[in-house]
């Protein structure tokens, strides 16, 4: 394993641009039944309501549990599977045609399924109601709620500052809501949102900040170039957002992550753009093209883990180096793992450890400060990243001190205890897994 250390250029405090008054109408899509091509297929002994628009738990379906019941949600060619995160046993299967993407809704219970024309709300069936110094946890059958946020090419979902932001690539529309209100709102519709529309549609991302401010990508279908900081909504109807700051030194801007202290980053084709303490800082790559388009952050560390690609002409580049960007100092380390990985290979441990699932089949655990590998945990057989990015490949998802790794080649999933460094449980899946996420319950 080799590593190289670099340091960023001084912070670049941009002059605020002219205020921009931008608005978008809230579009809601609500349905009472399952759409064509959908049905719920519970495993033996389980029950699922495929058409119910009410949250799981009404009608006496859910039961109180002694503690929160975390669950995993994964996609496959036939739909969505829900697993018990502790036993890895299947809780329910829900059929949903098409290539579907998963994002956490931000409330520990719901998952948003990007289906192309909507962010559909999926209820995992587990939640905890807080009552002062204690809580009551419940578990019931999962279901596709029938509620959805209409979208033109549903894209990135970001949870930050106790808000969830949805970005529609086809229209540039952004919708932001409080995830704490989602469960109650689903009983009759959708939660109240604030909306914004980018000047031009593009494959973008929006990051809610404290105080109602918003970071949003700049670009169009041909070219993406940076980030803008927008003020909290103002005006009689709360539709106006003045632009406070922008930085256009981030070609191909993509993705986002948050480090300790609320520092936000986005990846560029020549480094990483950092927003911290009211200013943008560019961390430059040592190569003319050094893309850090996928990132993973941790509230326990100021360091952002990113990928690192150097071939702008590659149809599929299989990099072996990862990037570690210290958002407090601007220092950049490039660490060669000796194995390649994919965009679904990056994660963070409970203490901020940098986790990378390599094509050698091992989960590599690194100290983010030094870039030194702490341990290598064998999990799955060696694999090769497929050329089509939508195709299944081993995926990594971390919840607490457990890392979950899918094995599409054998339709299995593995739970890795990050404390002991061992695979502690494996489970059989009915279908070939693709995307993976989870809820805490």
Image (cartoon, rainbow, N blue to C red):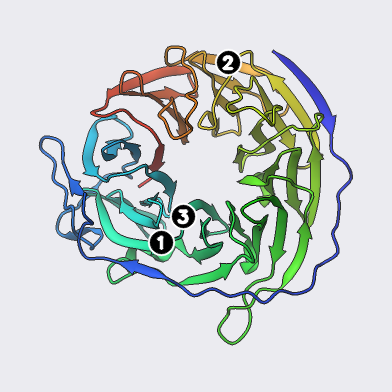
* Residue named by callout 1: 132
Please identify the quarter of the rendering in which residue 182 is found.
bottom left
**SS for callout 1:** loop
The residue at 30%/36% (across/down) is 77
Q: Is residue 387 left or right of residue 229?
A: left
Please identify the quarter of the rendering in which residue 425 is found.
top left
**SS for callout 3:** loop
Between discs 2 and 1, the one toward the N terminus: 1
Between discs 3 and 2, the one toward the N terminus: 3
Instruction: State the residue lying farthest toward the bottom.
Output: 236
Query: Which label sits in the foreground, 1 or 3?
Result: 3
In the image, residue 123 above or below residue 389: below
Instruction: Report, in whole angstroms, how far the alpha carbon at label 2 lies from the one at label 1.
Output: 41 Å
Residue 189: x and y, percent? 32, 70
Between discs 1 and 3, the one toward the N terminus: 1
* Residue named by callout 3: 153
Residue 57: x and y, percent? 22, 57
The residue at 64%/72% (across/down) is 232
Q: Is residue 150 left or right of residue 206?
A: left
Total marks in image: 3
| Residue 32 appears in the rendering | yes
Q: Is residue 198 left or right of residue 7?
A: left
* Residue named by callout 2: 375
The residue at 50%/65% (across/down) is 175
The answer to whether marks 1 and 3 mark residues whose Cβ atoms lie closer than 8 Å is no
């Amino acid at each position: 394993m080799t590593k190289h250390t670099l340091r960023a250029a001084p912070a670049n405090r941009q002059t605020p641009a002219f205020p921009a008054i931008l608005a978008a109408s809230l579009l809601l899509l609500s349905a009472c039944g399952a759409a064509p091509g959908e049905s719920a297929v519970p495993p033996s002994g389980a029950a699922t309501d495929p058409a119910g628009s009410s949250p799981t738990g009404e009608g006496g379906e859910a039961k109180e549990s002694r503690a929160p019941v975390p669950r995993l949600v994964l996609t496959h060619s036939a739909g969505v599977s829900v697993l018990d995160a502790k036993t890895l046993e299947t809780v329910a299967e829900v059929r949903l045609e098409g290539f579907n993407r998963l994002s956490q809704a931000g409330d520990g219970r719901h998952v948003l399924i990007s289906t192309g024309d909507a962010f559909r709300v999926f209820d995992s069936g587990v939640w905890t109601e807080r009552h002062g110094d204690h809580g009551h946890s419940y578990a019931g059958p999962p279901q596709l709620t029938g509620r959805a946020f209409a979208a033109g090419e549903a894209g990135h979902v970001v949870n930050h500052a106790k808000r969830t932001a949805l970005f529609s690539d086809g229209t540039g529309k952004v919708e932001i809501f409080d995830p704490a209100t989602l469960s109650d709102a689903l009983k009759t519709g959708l939660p109240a949102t604030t909306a914004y529309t980018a000047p031009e549609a593009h494959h973008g991302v929006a990051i809610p900040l404290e105080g109602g401010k918003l970071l949003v990508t700049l670009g169009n279908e041909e070219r993406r170039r940076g980030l803008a900081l927008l003020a909290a909504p103002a005006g009689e109807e709360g539709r106006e957002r003045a632009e406070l700051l922008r930085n256009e030194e981030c070609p191909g801007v993509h993705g986002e992550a948050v480090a300790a202290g609320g520092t936000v980053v986005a990846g560029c084709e020549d480094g990483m753009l950092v927003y911290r303490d009211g200013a943008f800082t560019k961390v430059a790559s040592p190569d003319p093209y050094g893309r850090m388009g996928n990132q993973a952050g941790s509230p326990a560390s100021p360091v952002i883990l990113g990928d690192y690609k150097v071939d702008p002409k590659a149809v599929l580049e299989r990099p072996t180096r990862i990037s570690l960007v210290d958002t407090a100092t601007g220092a950049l380390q490039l660490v060669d793992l000796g194995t390649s990985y994919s965009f679904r290979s990056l994660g963070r441990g409970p203490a901020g450890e940098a986790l990378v699932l390599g094509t050698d089949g091992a989960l590599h655990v690194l100290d983010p400060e030094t870039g030194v590998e702490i341990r290598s945990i064998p999990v799955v057989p060696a694999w090769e990243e497929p050329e089509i990015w939508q195709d299944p490949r081993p995926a990594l998802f971390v919840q607490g001190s457990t890392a979950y790794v899918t094995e599409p080649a054998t339709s299995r999933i593995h739970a890795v205890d990050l404390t002991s460094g061992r695979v502690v449980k494996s489970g059989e899946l009915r279908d070939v897994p693709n995307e993976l996420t989870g809820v805490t319950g």
